[in-house]
Image (tube, rainbow, N blue to C red):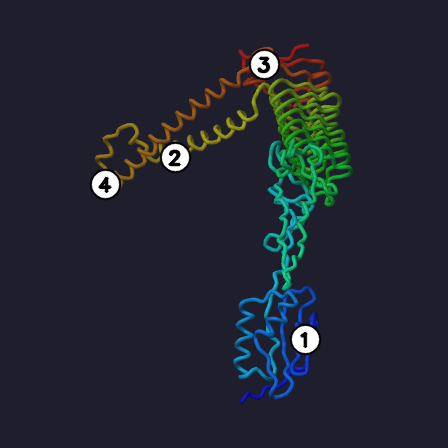
């Protein structure tokens, strides 16, 4: 006798599961067979309801129904039908819903991808806190790239893979779309279009769907909090002012349309400031080429080329490996080093503010010389202390043998230290002499003053030095008096 089964109402799966519906049904007086599918035809279920205890259905009948609907029945589906019929004995009762067919969904292609080998230009300027703090001057808005540098690579979109429904019909897939980016100016692309390179050194930018490189950075207004510090591989042009506390580092020239306050400029070429530099004691200017400005005030400057000032140099430290020229005004309260000569209408001031002028010297050499002289002074002081402590032992070494063992050991150590200090002192003195020799200049090196040198000005040309006790009215030229180690004035 067949097992009792609770009948499943016709279309039960279609009614209870969203997206499913009865695709086809075969009904007669003894049984109902239904094929239920999802909207895309990716899953097929069969369910059977037998009417009456003596009604029955066979596997062949179910499979024939499915075949008539062109359903591709899976092996798992055939096994499931057989097992279900076995459970209900002679085949009467209810079956299902049973999953008898499963299609394969289409796999759409992936879009082409952009692999950025440098920071993305559309993400530049995003602030990142470090240990809970943000330096708002470091806005990181500039992405530097060098000529020939690879910017990005493109991965091709994939075609995707077509699917198949339970009836064996193909389901189309959507191919991926190419990456949405094009080359802009100053960008090279390989023939296959997959790799982008910088054609010039400069700033990487994006404009719409294009990527481009700008060889020059132009700031239309001031350098302030809206711009932040600038670190750029190429030339920088600022149309207005550079405010307190900001830094501009450029691989090439820097040109400032207005003035510079207490900021730092570092250039791999020249610096041109159309206004003045009022450094407030905080500005530092370093350039490998020339420096031009209306005036220098309270600023430290190091230039690998000439320094050309329209008006004056006041309370500044100015070093040049070229010549320094002041057109009007003068040099007051400054410490100035110019390797190839100097020209100024006036030097010094009525108030006697200390002004030091050094000409004919590499300022790097000058700095080394100062450090060496400081070390020599410390060494000589140490030698004097040891000599004072040893006293008569230096005149007669035999005295050590008369001392107690502990004092004799101390004396021997002091003598050893003294020998080392004297040896080191001799080595430094030799280097010092060699450096002084390099500082010697010929008689053609001169300083030119058109109006006046004020009393108190200290001058040095090569190794020749002079401090002026009285005012000297120009025009005059000053040359090294090598024989007397002084500076001579000629008219």
Residue under numbered circle 3? 480
- Residue 60, percent across and down? 57, 73
Q: Where is residue 265 in the image (x, y as percent from the top left)?
A: 66, 34
Above or below, comparing residue 193 to residue 424 in the picture: below
Q: Nearer the viewer, mark 4 or mark 1?
A: 1
From what the image shows, is residue 163 above or below residue 58? above
Q: Is residue 148 visible in the rendered structure shown here? A: yes
Sequence order check, earlier mark of 4 and 3? 4
Rounded to the nearest angstrom, the CA distance separating label 4 from label 2 is 22 Å
- Mark 4 vs mark 3: give the one in front: 3
Circle nearer the N terminus (4, 2): 2
Q: Which of marks 3 and 1 is in front?
A: 1
Q: Mark 4 and mark 3 in contact? Answer it, CB < 8 Å.
A: no
Q: Earlier in the sequence, mark 3 or mark 2?
A: 2
Where is mark 2, residue-wise? 385
Q: Judging from the image, what secondary structure is the residue with disc 4 in? A: loop
SS at circle 2? helix
> What separation in Å lies between label 4 and label 1 (alpha carbons)?
127 Å
């Amino acid at each position: 006798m067949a097992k009792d089964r609770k009948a499943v109402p016709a279309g039960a799966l279609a009614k209870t599961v969203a997206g499913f519906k009865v695709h086809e049904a075969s009904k007669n007086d003894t049984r109902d067979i239904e094929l239920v599918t999802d909207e895309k035809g990716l899953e097929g279920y069969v369910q059977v309801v037998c009417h009456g205890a003596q009604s029955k259905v066979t596997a062949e009948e179910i499979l024939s129904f499915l075949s008539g609907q062109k359903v591709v029945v899976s092996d798992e589906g055939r096994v499931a039908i057989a097992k279900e019929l076995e459970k209900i004995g002679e085949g009467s009762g209810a079956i299902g819903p049973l999953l008898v067919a499963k299609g394969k969904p289409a796999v759409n292609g992936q879009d082409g991808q952009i692999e950025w080998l440098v920071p993305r230009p559309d993400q530049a300027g995003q602030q990142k806190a470090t240990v809970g703090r943000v330096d708002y001057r470091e806005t990181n808005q500039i992405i530097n790239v060098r000529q020939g540098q690879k910017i990005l690579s493109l991965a091709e979109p994939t075609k995707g893979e077509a699917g198949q429904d339970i009836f064996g019909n193909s389901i189309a897939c959507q191919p991926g779309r190419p990456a949405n980016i094009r080359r802009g100016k100053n960008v090279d692309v390989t023939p296959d279009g997959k790799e982008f390179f910088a054609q010039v050194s400069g700033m990487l930018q994006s404009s719409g769907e294009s990527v481009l490189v700008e060889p020059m950075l132009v700031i239309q207004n001031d350098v302030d909090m809206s711009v932040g510090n600038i670190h750029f591989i190429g030339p920088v042009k600022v149309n207005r002012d550079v405010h307190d506390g900001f830094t501009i580092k450029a691989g090439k020239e820097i040109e400032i349309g207005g003035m510079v306050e207490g900021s730092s400029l570092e250039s791999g070429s020249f610096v041109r400031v159309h206004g003045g530099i009022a450094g407030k004691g905080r500005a530092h200017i370093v350039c490998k080429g020339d420096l031009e400005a209306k005036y220098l005030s309270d600023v430290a400057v190091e230039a690998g080329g000439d320094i050309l000032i329209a008006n004056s140099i006041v309370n500044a430290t100015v070093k040049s490996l070229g010549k320094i020229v002041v057109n009007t005004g003068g040099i007051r309260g400054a410490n100035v080093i110019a390797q190839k000569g100097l020209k100024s209408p006036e030097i010094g001031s009525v108030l006697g503010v200390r002004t030091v002028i050094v000409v004919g010297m590499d300022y790097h050499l000058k700095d080394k010389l100062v450090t060496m002289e400081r070390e020599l002074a410390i060494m000589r002081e140490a030698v004097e202390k040891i000599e004072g402590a040893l006293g008569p032992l230096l005149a007669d070494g035999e005295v050590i043998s008369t001392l107690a063992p502990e004092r004799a050991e101390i004396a021997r150590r002091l003598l050893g230290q003294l020998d080392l200090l004297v040896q080191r002192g001799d080595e430094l003195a030799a280097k010092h002499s060699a450096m002084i020799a390099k500082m010697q200049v010929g008689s053609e090196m001169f300083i030119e003053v058109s109006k006046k040198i004020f009393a108190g000005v200290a001058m040095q040309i090569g190794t020749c030095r002079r401090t002026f006790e009285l005012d000297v009215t120009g025009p005059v030229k000053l040359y090294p008096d090598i024989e007397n180690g002084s500076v001579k004035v000629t008219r």
